[in-house]
Image (cartoon, rainbow, N blue to C red):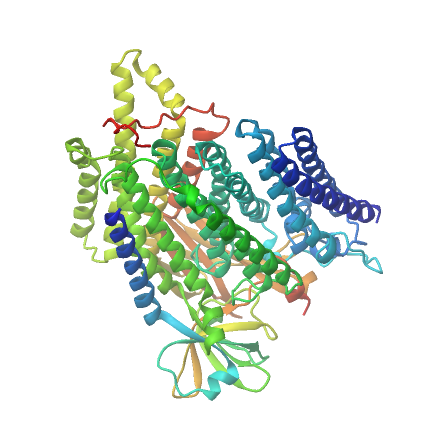
C-alpha cells in the first residue's frame, strides 16, 4: 500500500523534473548559458533517480506480494517462483513502460556524463530531447498506465503469471529486447541535437556510434534470446515466424546495422552526412512505430496484447517525432552537403553504400508485409502475408548482403586496384568449395546452395583478415604475443570482424535448420520405435508427476543412451491451462526435438518429432556476435580514427 | 554521382519487384467466419478467425482434430491434422489457415491461437 503512494509520488516528481530539464536544457543550450545547462542536466539525473526509486518500489511490492496493487495482483501470485515474481516487473504493460523509462533514464544519464567533448550546445540540446522523450513516458505512466493503481479490495492471492511465461526465458529475453528498444532513443537524441545545433561534423558521430552500438548489442541479444526461447518453449520446431511483433523488433536492428557501417564512411571520408542522420532517426521512428502497432493491437498478430488506452498516446508521440525529425532534416538539408569527391563504385565506401541500400530494401519489404493488413483493410478486404512472402522477398537481398560481407572487408578505401582481385580468392574459393560439396551431395535447392556457401565465404574473409593481420605483426617483430597485443589494440576493427564471423555462423545455422528440417507425426505403443533421419527413438511409457504448481504427464523416449521426456503440464490454478514441454537433445550437428501431441486411453501416445540440423549454430553465432561487440567496444580506449587523406592533391580553393 | 543514382534506381526496382512478386503468390485474405460464408469458393488459402465451440473431436492420439469455429452469425467446421496450440480449447479465438473444401468443411493447414499475451492474463481467466 505504502509503495503505491510513494511510487506514484516518485513518478510524478520524475515527470516534473524531466519536463523542467527539457525546457531548461533547450533554452540554456540556445542561449549558451553554461550554468543553466548544468542545472538542466542535473534535473535529468534527478528524474532518472526518481524512476529508479519508483522501479525499486514496484519490485518491492511484487516481492512482498502486496496484492493491494492491481499490477501485482494481475501479474503474480503466491505459487509463482520468486525469480519470476521479480520478472513480473517488466512482464506487464505498465511495468514494461516503467522499465523502458528506467533504461532511458540510466543510459541517457551515462550518455550525458560522457558528452563533455561535444560542445555545450549540442550536449544541452541532447539532454533536452532525451528529457522530452522521458517526459512522454512519464506522462503515460502517470496518467494512463500507472503500475501503482490500487485495488479497492485486496485479494488474498494474485492471478499469476501465464504458464507459457513461467520459464527461464522470461528472465532474460524481455529485459534485453526492451532495453534495446529504449536505448535507440539515445543515438536519436544526439543526432537530432547535432542537427538542431547545426553541427554535422564527425563529433556527434563518434558519440552516437558508441551508443548506437550499445543499442545494437542489446537488440541483437534480445532477438537471439527471443528465438531461443520460442524454439524451446512453443513447440512448433521453429524460432522465427515473421510475426508483426518479431518484425518490429527486427527493423530498428536493421537500420542500426546500416548506420554502424555508414558511420565509418563519414568518419573516414566525411561523406554520407545527411544519410547518417536519416538512419539514426529512422531506427528510432521504427521503434516508436513498432511500439504503437504492437501495443495498440491494430495489426493481427499471434501475440495478442491487451487492448489498452496507450495506443492513441503512442500514435500521437509517433506523429510528433515524425514531424520533428522530418522538419529538422528539411531545415538543415542545405548544411548536410558532403565534402570530398564522390566515391567510385568499387571501393570500401561503395560497398558500404550498397549494403546500406540493401538493408533499407529489407526494411521496406518487412515494413510492407507488417503494414499490409492495415493498408489493405483501409482499402477493402484485409489481406495478410505469411512467412513465404518474407522469405521470397528478403532472400535475394540477404544473399546480396552476404556476398558484400564476404567481399567488402577486402576492398580498400577510395578505390580498388589489382590487390583486390587477388585477396578475393579466399572467399571465392570457400564459396566454390562448399557449393561443389553440396551439389555433389545432391542438393538442388537454390536458397540452400547460396546460403551455406555464402556463410562460409563470409567466415573465410574474417579468418583471412585475422591471419593476415597476425602474420604481419608477428613478422614486424615481437612474435605471437605482439600480434595478440596489436589485435587487442585494434579491437574495434577486429571486434567487428568477430561479429561478422558470428553472423556467418548464424546464417549457416538458419539455412541448414530451415531447409534440412525433417518432421514426422507418429502414434506409438510402449516399446515401439520410430526412425527419423537416422535417429531412432523408443517410446517406453507414460508417467504422472505432481509438482508445486502443476501436474505433468511425462512420456519417456529413449534415444541411444539418453532419455527424452516430452510432457504436458496442467496448471489447475489457472482453469486447467495446459502447456507442452518440448524435449530437445542438442548436439553440434542436429537437434532431436520431440513434442508430446496427445495420449490415448490404451497407453499409446502421439508425438511430433523434428530433426533440426545445426540449430545450435544459431545460438553459438549469436554468442560470437555479442563477444565481438563486447571485445570491440566495451570500455575501449577510443582509438583515434585516421581520416583517409586524399592521395591526389586537391586544386587550390577546393574544399 | 550519376552512377550512384543508377544504383539507387536499380536497387529500388529490385526491391519493388521482389515485394510485388512475393506478395502476389502468398498474400491471403484475413476473414471472419461470416465473411468466409459470404464469399465464393476462393482460389487461394485464406485465414479465418473465430471462436472454438465445445464440439472438439480428437482422433489419432490428438493429432487429428475436428471442431466448429464460429463468430457472431456464422459457423464452419474445421478439420486439421497436426499439433495444436497449448491454449486450444472451447471459447478461445483461433485463426485457421487453409481453404474451404467442396464438402463445406474448412481444411486447415495451420491453426494459430491468439497467443497468451505477455501483457495480460485475461485470456486465462475467461
Query: Does residue A177 appear anywhere in the picture?
Result: yes
Q: Is residue A402 above or below residue B39?
A: above
Residue drawn at x 61%, y 59% as measured from the top left: A316
Residue drawn at x 36%, y 19% as measured from the top left: A486
- Quadrant placement of the C terminus of chain B: bottom right
Seen from this angle, which residue lies furthest top? A478
Foreground residue among B44 and A643: A643
Foreground residue among A276 and A305: A276
Query: Does residue A533 appear anywhere in the picture?
Result: no
Is residue A231 rendered to the left or right of residue A416? right
Q: Is residue A633 above or below residue B98?
A: above
Residue drawn at x 67%, y 30% as measured from the top left: A38
Is residue A156 rendered to the left or right of residue A222? right
Q: Is residue B89 above or below residue A572?
A: below
Foreground residue among A404 and A546: A404
Q: Position of residue A633 (x, y in %)?
A: 46, 30
Q: Position of residue A424 (x, y in %)?
A: 19, 36
Q: Position of residue A40 (x, y in %)?
A: 68, 36
Q: Position of residue A531 (x, y in %)?
A: 34, 58
Q: Is residue A379 above or below residue A333?
A: below
Q: How many marks?
A: 0
Amino acid at each position: 500500500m505504502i509503495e503505491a503512494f510513494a511510487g506514484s509520488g516518485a513518478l510524478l516528481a520524475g515527470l516534473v523534473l524531466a519536463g523542467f530539464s527539457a525546457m531548461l536544457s533547450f533554452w540554456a543550450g540556445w542561449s549558451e548559458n553554461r550554468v543553466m545547462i548544468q542545472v538542466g542536466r542535473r534535473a535529468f539525473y534527478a528524474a532518472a533517480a526518481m524512476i529508479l526509486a519508483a522501479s525499486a518500489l514496484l519490485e518491492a511490492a511484487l516481492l512482498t506480494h502486496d496484492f493491494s496493487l492491481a499490477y501485482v495482483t494481475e501479474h503474480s501470485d503466491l505459487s509463482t517462483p520468486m525469480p519470476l515474481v521479480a520478472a513480473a516487473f517488466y512482464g506487464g504493460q505498465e511495468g514494461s513502460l516503467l522499465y523502458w523509462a528506467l533504461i532511458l533514464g540510466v543510459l541517457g544519464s551515462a550518455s550525458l556524463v560522457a558528452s563533455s567533448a561535444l560542445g555545450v550546445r549540442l550536449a544541452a540540446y541532447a539532454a533536452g530531447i532525451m528529457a522530452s522523450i522521458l517526459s512522454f513516458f512519464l506522462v503515460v505512466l502517470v496518467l494512463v498506465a500507472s503500475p501503482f493503481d490500487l485495488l479497492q479490495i485486496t485479494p488474498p492471492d494474485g492471478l499469476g503469471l501465464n504458464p507459457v511465461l513461467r520459464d527461464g526465458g522470461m528472465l532474460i529475453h524481455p529485459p534485453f529486447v526492451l532495453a534495446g528498444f529504449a536505448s535507440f532513443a539515445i543515438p536519436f537524441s544526439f543526432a537530432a541535437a547535432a542537427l538542431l545545433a547545426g553541427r554535422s561534423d564527425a563529433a556527434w558521430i563518434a558519440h552516437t556510434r558508441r551508443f548506437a552500438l550499445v543499442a545494437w548489442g542489446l537488440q541483437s541479444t534480445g532477438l537471439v534470446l527471443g528465438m531461443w526461447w520460442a524454439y524451446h518453449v512453443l513447440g512448433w520446431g521453429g524460432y522465427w515466424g515473421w510475426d508483426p511483433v518479431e518484425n518490429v523488433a527486427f527493423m530498428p536492428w536493421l537500420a542500426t546495422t546500416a548506420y554502424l557501417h555508414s558511420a565509418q564512411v563519414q568518419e573516414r571520408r566525411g561523406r554520407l552526412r545527411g544519410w547518417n542522420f536519416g538512419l539514426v532517426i529512422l531506427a528510432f521512428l521504427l521503434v516508436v512505430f513498432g511500439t504503437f502497432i504492437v501495443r495498440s493491437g491494430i495489426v493481427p498478430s499471434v501475440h495478442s496484447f491487451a487492448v489498452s488506452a496507450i495506443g492513441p498516446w503512442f500514435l500521437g508521440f509517433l506523429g510528433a517525432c515524425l514531424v520533428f525529425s522530418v522538419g529538422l532534416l528539411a531545415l538543415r538539408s542545405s548544411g548536410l552537403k558532403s565534402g570530398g569527391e564522390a566515391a567510385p563504385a568499387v571501393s570500401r565506401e561503395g560497398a558500404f553504400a550498397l549494403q546500406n541500400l540493401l538493408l533499407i530494401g529489407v526494411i521496406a519489404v518487412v515494413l510492407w508485409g507488417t503494414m499490409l493488413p492495415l493498408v489493405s483493410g483501409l482499402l477493402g478486404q484485409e489481406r495478410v502475408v505469411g512467412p513465404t512472402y518474407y522469405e521470397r522477398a528478403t532472400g535475394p537481398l540477404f544473399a546480396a548482403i552476404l556476398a558484400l560481407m564476404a567481399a567488402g572487408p577486402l576492398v580498400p578505401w577510395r578505390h580498388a586496384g589489382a590487390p583486390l582481385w587477388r585477396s578475393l580468392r579466399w572467399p571465392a574459393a570457400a564459396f566454390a568449395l562448399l557449393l561443389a560439396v553440396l551439389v555433389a551431395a545432391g542438393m538442388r535447392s537454390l536458397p540452400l546452395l547460396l546460403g551455406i556457401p555464402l556463410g562460409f565465404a563470409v567466415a573465410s574473409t574474417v579468418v583471412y583478415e585475422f591471419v593476415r593481420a597476425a602474420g604481419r605483426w608477428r613478422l614486424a617483430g615481437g612474435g605471437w604475443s605482439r600480434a595478440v597485443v596489436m589485435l587487442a589494440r585494434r579491437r574495434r576493427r577486429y571486434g567487428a570482424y568477430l561479429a561478422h564471423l558470428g553472423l556467418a555462423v548464424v546464417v549457416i545455422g538458419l539455412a541448414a535448420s530451415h531447409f534440412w528440417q525433417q518432421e514426422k507425426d507418429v502414434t506409438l505403443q510402449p516399446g515401439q520405435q520410430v526412425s527419423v533421419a537416422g535417429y531412432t527413438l523408443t517410446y517406453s511409457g507414460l508417467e504422472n508427476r505432481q509438482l508445486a504448481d502443476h501436474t505433468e504427464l511425462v512420456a519417456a523416449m529413449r534415444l541411444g543412451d539418453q532419455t527424452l521426456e516430452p510432457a504436458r503440464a496442467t496448471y489447475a490454478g489457472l482453469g486447467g491451462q495446459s502447456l507442452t514441454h518440448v524435449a530437445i537433445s542438442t548436439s553440434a550437428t542436429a537437434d532431436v526435438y520431440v513434442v508430446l501431441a496427445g495420449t490415448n486411453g490404451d497407453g499409446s501416445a502421439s508425438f511430433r518429432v523434428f530433426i533440426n540440423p545445426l540449430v545450435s549454430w544459431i545460438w553459438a553465432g549469436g554468442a560470437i556476435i555479442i563477444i565481438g561487440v563486447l571485445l570491440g567496444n566495451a570500455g575501449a580506449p577510443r582509438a583515434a580514427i585516421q581520416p583517409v587523406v586524399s592521395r591526389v592533391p586537391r586544386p587550390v580553393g577546393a574544399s | 554521382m550519376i552512377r550512384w543514382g543508377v544504383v539507387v534506381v536499380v536497387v529500388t526496382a529490385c526491391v519493388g519487384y521482389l515485394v510485388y512478386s512475393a506478395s502476389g503468390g502468398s498474400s491471403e485474405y484475413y476473414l471472419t467466419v461470416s465473411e468466409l460464408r459470404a464469399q465464393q469458393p476462393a482460389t487461394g488459402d485464406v485465414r479465418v478467425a473465430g471462436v472454438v465451440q465445445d464440439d472438439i473431436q480428437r482422433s489419432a492420439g490428438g493429432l487429428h482434430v475436428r471442431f466448429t469455429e464460429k463468430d457472431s452469425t456464422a459457423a464452419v467446421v474445421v478439420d486439421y491434422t497436426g499439433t495444436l496450440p497449448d491454449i486450444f480449447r472451447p471459447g478461445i479465438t483461433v485463426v485457421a489457415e487453409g481453404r474451404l473444401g467442396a464438402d463445406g468443411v474448412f481444411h486447415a493447414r495451420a491453426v494459430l491461437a491468439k497467443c497468451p499475451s505477455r501483457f495480460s492474463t485475461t485470456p486465462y481467466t475467461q
